[in-house]
Amino acid sequence: MSSTATLTDLILETFRLNGRLLAAGDALVGDLGLTSARWQVLGAVVLSPVPLPVAHVARNMGLSRQNVQRIANELEAQGIVRFAPNPHHQRAKLVLPTARGQAVYEAASARQEPWAAALADGVPAHAVAAAVQVLRTLRERLEDETPPPD
């Protein structure tokens, strides 16, 4: 099989995996008031070393600003994040977790760790690391070629 065909198989498998991961994530954190998308945005906000506006969160995640804004608005309505003034830009508010948001994120993370451990059972760590490197290389090449979504 050629490397092009093999890469196409990897891309198709990645699409399938993404669908399964989203469904599993939704099931894992649904009772916390999260979806996979909300969890992903909340995680980006919680894990950022500095408060970021929606556009920077979106860029870091490789998502459209509009989609991240919609999700951030939903999280704000749930009391999970709040918007704060941005000293660097009058209109681009910073997204910050609330105390409730931090607690929800920690609860989700506590569930994710044993779930991930069970999923990884029997898969050698070096194989996972190699997969991470291949996916990272492909993502970086795409980022070099394609403007970020907006």
Image (cartoon, rainbow, N blue to C red):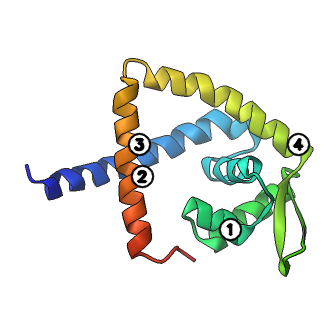
User: What residue appears at the point 81 percent right and 59 percent down from the top-left corner?
Assistant: 51
Numbered-mark total? 4
Q: Quadrant of residue 145?
A: bottom left
Q: Secondary structure at mark 1?
A: helix
Q: Amino acid at mark 4?
A: Arg
The answer to whether the residue labelled 2 contacts the one labelled 4, judged by CB atoms less than 8 Å apart, is: no
Which sits earlier in the primary sequence, circle 2 or circle 1? 1
Residue that numbered label 4 is attached to: 100
Dot 1 alpha-carbon crowd within 10 angstroms: few under 14, some 14 to 19, many 20 or more: some
Q: Report the residue marked by disc 1.
A: 56
Q: Which residue is mark 3?
A: 132
The furthest residue to the top: 122
Taking the view exactly as shown, the residue that stands out farthest to the left is: 1
Q: Position of residue 98 (x, y in %)?
A: 89, 49
Q: Quadrant of residue 102?
A: top right
Task: Tell me the SS state at disc 2.
Answer: helix
- Numbered circle sitting on residue 136: 2
Q: Earlier in the sequence, mark 1 or mark 3?
A: 1
Residue 16 in sight here: no
- Residue 139: x and y in percent read 41, 59
| Disc 2/disc 1 C-alpha distance (Å) | 19 Å
* Residue at figure coordinates x 49%, y 42% from the top left: 21
Q: Is residue 114 visible?
A: yes
* Circle 3 Cα neighbour tier, 10 Å, few/some/many (<14 / 14–19 / ≥20): few
Q: Earlier in the sequence, mark 2 or mark 4?
A: 4
User: Which amino acid does the dot numbered 2 rest on?
Assistant: Arg
Give residue 64's position: percent from left, percent from top: 59, 71
3D distance between C-alphas at marks 1 and 4: 23 Å
Q: Are marks 3 and 2 in contact (CB under 8 Å)?
A: yes
Cα–Cα gap, marks 3 and 4:
32 Å
